[in-house]
Amino acid sequence: MYRFVTWLNTAFLVISAIFVVLMMLHVTADVLLRSVSNAGIIGTLEVVSYYYMVCAIFLAFGYVEMHNEHIRVDLFVQQMPRSAQVVLYILACLAGFVFFGLLAWQSMIDALRATASQETIMSNFLFYVWPSRWALPIGFIGCLLAILCNLLKSVTRWRAL
Amino acid sequence: ETNFIANSFYDAEHPLSKFGYVEWADTVREISGGDLNPEVYTGTVLLAPRASLQGARDNIANVANIAAVYTPSELPVANAVQELGFNYSDPLTAIFAVADFSIHNEVQQKEWADNGIVYLGAYATPPYILFCSKPVRTLEEIKGKRIRTAGSSVSKWVEEVGGIPVNVPSSEMYTGLERGTLDCATNAANDLIDRSLWEVAPYTTELSTGMYWSGPEWGFNAGFWSGLTTTQRKQLMDATAHAMSSMVVNYLARSNAALDEAKAKGNEIYQPSAELMASVEAFREKVLGDIYTVAEDKYGVADGMSLIDDFRFTYAKWEGLLENVDRTDIDALDAIARKEIYGTLDPATYGVN
Amino acid sequence: MSNLDIGIVGTLVALGLIALRVPIGVSLGLVSIGGIAAMFNVNVAFGMISATPFEYVGQWELTAAPMFLLMGFICSSTNMTKGLFEALRLYLARLPGGLAIASVGACAFFAAAAGSSVATASAMSRIAVPEMLRNNYDKGLATGTIAASGTLGSLIPPSVLLILYGVYAKVSVGQLFMAGFIPGVLSALVYMAMIMTRVKLKPSLAGTVTEYPTKEEKRAALKTIWPLPVLIFSVLGGIFSGVFSPTEAGAIGAFVAAVIAALRGSLTWIAIKSALRDTIVAATGIFVILIGSVFFTRFLALSGLPAAFSDAILGISSEPWWIFLAVTVIYVVLGMLIDSIGLLLLTLPLILPLVHGAGLDPVWFGIILIKLLEIGLVTPPVGLNVYMIKGALGNLVTLPEVFRGVGWFIAMDFLTLIILMLIPGLSLWLPTLAYR
Ligand code: NA
Ligand code: NA
C-alpha cells in the first residue's frame, strides 16, 4: 500500500507540475500575442485560474503530506520525550484525517452536483468549470491516503515523522 | 425576538449594501419594533459573490444578495431574462418591474424554489457606461480598443463594433487602465469616483452598455422564511418595498453626482456619436429578434416566448405606473411598490412550503 | 456560551493545536468548522467547506503566487545569483564587513526577482554564508545577515505577501509594489550601515579578508552579473510600461528566468525538476494555510470577535500612534509563533477594521504590516528564515548562533519601522508618482 500511495501522489505531483508549466506558458503566450497583435488568447483568465491553478494546487496535497512538508510549528514539541512526540504526531494525523476527510466528502458532493448541472461561470462566453471541481476530491483523497501511510509508518516505527 | 444573518457582498459604502442592507436592517428593526433583528455583513468576509446563492441555500446567511450572473448554470431563467439588460437603461423602472416579474412569474418562481431561496426584492444598477483612457465617441474611435466587459451580450456588441472584450477582475480595472492593458472599462457611473477610476480614465462616454438586475437583492433561505410568523413576513415585505425605493433613488443620485464630481476634476463626459448610438440600437433590435431562441437554446427555458414576453409586458406596465411619479420621492415609490407588488401577496403563504 | 466566547475559545484552541505540531492550516480549519457548527449548525459548517476552497484558489490574482515562486526557484536551482554576488564581493572587498555588505546587496537584488522571503534566504544562504565562513566571519554575523536580508524578499517587489494583502484588503497590488520599493532599499541600507559600524568597532567580526582583486578580475566578474538585472528589468519594466499586469508578471518572470538559464546552459533537467517540485510544495503549503485561514476568518467574523477586538483598541484611542503601537505589539508577539503568511491572513480580519477606523492609508499600512511580518520571520522561537538557513547549512552553525546574530538586525528593523511610521512619504511617494 505504501508504495502504491507514494506512486500515486508522485504521479499527481507530475500532473501538478505540468499545470504549473502550462500556466507559465499560457500567460506568457497571451501577453506576447497581445503585444504583437493587440488581441490575446480568449479565455486565458478563465482557463488559468479555474483549471491550471485549481489542479496544480489541489492535486499536490497528497505529495506535500507524504513528504511531511505541511507547515507546522516544531518548536515546543522538540523539547518533549519521544513517546509524547509520537502521541502528538498521531493526534496531528487524526486531526488532518478528519479535516481533509470533511473536505473530501463535501467536495465530492459538490463535484457531483456541478457535473449534474454542467456548472458554468460568468464569462464573455460559455465556460464550463465542472470538470475542474473533481481536482478537489481527488487531491483530498490522495492526501487522506498519505496521512494513513504516515500514521502507520509512525506507529510501527514508534517515531514522529 | 428573531436574530438573523444578512449578507451583502458589496462593500459597506456601495449603494446596494448601504441602502439595501445597512439601512434596510434599521427599517426592519423599526417596523418590527425590534422583534426582527438582522445582523448585517458586508463585503466578502462571509460570502464571496459566487458563493452567495449556495450560502443562502445552506443557511450560512439567512438572507443574501445574489447576483445570478455569477451562477448561470444554477439560475438559467434569471440569466435568460438578464440577456435583455442591453436593451434597457432606466434602473428606476427596472427595479420595480424586475421585482414584480420575479415574484409573480411562475417559471421564475419555480427556479427560486428549486434553489431553496425565497425572492423578496430586486436591485437594478444604473446603466454601465464607458470609462476610457482615450476618447471613445465614434465607431472609428472604439475600433481596436480593449474594453473590460461584464457579460456576454455586451461583449458581443463590443466585438461587433470592432473592439476587444476583455475579462479581468474588477480589482484589476484600475491598474489595467493606468498601465494600458485596458483602454476602457464598463461600470456604473459611481465607480468613476468610488473606485477612483477617474484618475486613470479621464474620458467617459455616456453610452449605456446595459444594466444588471439578475437575482434577488434579498434572497431568503426558504426554511428560515417558512419559520417566520406571518406578521414578521409582512414586516419584511414592507421594509423591502421601502428599501428598494430608497436604494434605487440613492443609487441614481450617487451615479449622477459621480459624473459631476468627475467633471469638476477635469474629466471629459461625452455623449456617443449618432452612428455609435445607431449601432447600439441596431444591436438591441438584433437581441430582441434572437431572445426567444437564446432563452430556449442557451438557457434551456421551455417556453422562451411566454417568459420573455411576460417580462417585457411587466416592464411596460411599470413604465406606465411610474409615468407621473416624482422620480426622487422615495415614499411615493414605496407606496406604489407596496400596492402593486406586495399587495398581491399573502404573507401567510408566499414562499412558504 | 455566547458566540463571542466561542470565538475566544476557538482562537485559543487553534493556537494550542498549532503549538502541538498540528499543521497550521489543519488547526485553523478544524477549529473553524467545529466552532461554526457549535455557533449555528453542521449545515452552515458544511456550507462553508463547500463554498470556499474552489472559489478561493480559483482567483486570477492569486495565480501570481506560484508563478513568482517558480521564478525564484528557477533562479536558485540554476545558480543565477552567483555571478552578481561574486562581482559585489570583489568590488566591496576593502570595505569593513565587505562580504556581509555584498550579501545584503545581493539579497536586495534577488528580492527584486523573487516573491518570497524564504526563497530569498534559501537561495542566498547556499551562496553567501559558506563564503563568509571561509573568510573567518563571525558565524552569527554571517548567518544573521542572510536571515535578515532574506526578509527584503517580501518588501521589495514582487512579493507574495503584498499580493495577498492587496487582494484581501482590496488595495491595488501595483500601488503596493511601488510602495514597497523605497522601504525595502531603506532596510537594506540600514543593515549595511549597521554592519559597517559594528565591524569598524570590532574588526574581528569580519575575520580576515586577504583578497585584493586585480582590475582584470573585477572586469571579468562584471561579465557574469547580467542574468539577474535582465530578469528584474524585464519584470518591473513590463509592469511599469503596461505590457503586462502585476498578476501576469509572475508567469513572464518565470519564463524569462528559464530562458536566461537556458542561454547560460544551466537549465538542466535536474534544475527544472527541483524548481518545479519546490514551487509546488511551497505553493501548496501556502494554500493549505490559506484555506484554513479563510475558514478561520469566517469563523471569527461570525463570532463577532474582530469587531469586539477593534472596538476595544479604538475605545482606548484612535490616534495613529496608538494603533501602530497596538499593532506592533500584536505582530511581534504573534510573529514569534506563527509564520508570516498564516499570520497575515489570520489577523487581517482583526486589523483591517482598525485601519479603516483610524483612517490610515491602506497602502502605507500594508508596508508597515509587511515589515512587521518580516520581523516575525527571524524572531525565535519560530523563525522560518532562520530554520531555512539552518537547513541549508546543516552542521556548520547551530540555531542559537543564528538567532544571536539576527538580534542586531531586528534592532535595525525596529529603527526602520519607526522611520516608516514617522514618514509616510517613504512608502507613498512612489505610488503617487506612478499613479498620480
Ligand atoms: Na520580492
Ligand atoms: Na518568529
Image: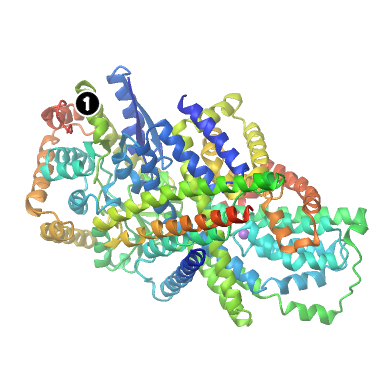
Q: Is residue B114 above or below residue A9?
A: above
Residue C346, visible in the rendered structure: yes
Judge from the rendering whether residue C120 lies leftward or rightward of residue B48; answer left or right.
Answer: right
Say what secondary structure mark 1 lies in: helix
Q: Amino acid at mark 1?
A: Arg
Instruction: Give me the residue at 21% from left, 21% from top.
Output: B231
What is the tally of numbered marks visible in this picture?
1
Judge from the rendering whether residue C345 lies leftward or rightward of residue C81; answer left or right.
Answer: left
Judge from the rendering whether residue B110 lies leftward or rightward of residue C381; answer left or right.
Answer: left
Q: Quadrant of residue C135?
A: bottom right
Residue with the mark numbered 1: B233
Residue B109 place in picture, x, y as percent: 15, 41
The subunit carrying tag 1 is: B
Residue C156 place in picture, x, y as percent: 63, 57
**Of residues B73 and A30, the one drawn nearer to the viewer in this rendering:** B73
Q: Would the CB of label 1 be found within 8 Å of ligand 2? A: no
Q: Is residue A140 above or below residue C31?
A: below
Residue A54 place in picture, x, y as percent: 42, 60
- State the residue lying farthest toward the top: B33
**Of residues A2 and C169, the one drawn nearer to the viewer in this rendering:** A2
**Of residues C196 and B180, the one drawn nearer to the viewer in this rendering:** C196
Judge from the rendering whether residue B259 lies leftward or rightward of residue C98; answer left or right.
Answer: left
- The image's colouring method is rainbow
Near mark 1 (Cα within 10 A), the count class, few <14, some 14-19 or many ≥20, is many
Instruction: Give me the residue at 85% from left, 57% from top.
Output: C196
Residue C302 place in picture, x, y as percent: 44, 34
Residue C169, visible in the rendered structure: no
Instruction: Give me the residue at 46% from left, 31% from top.
Output: C303
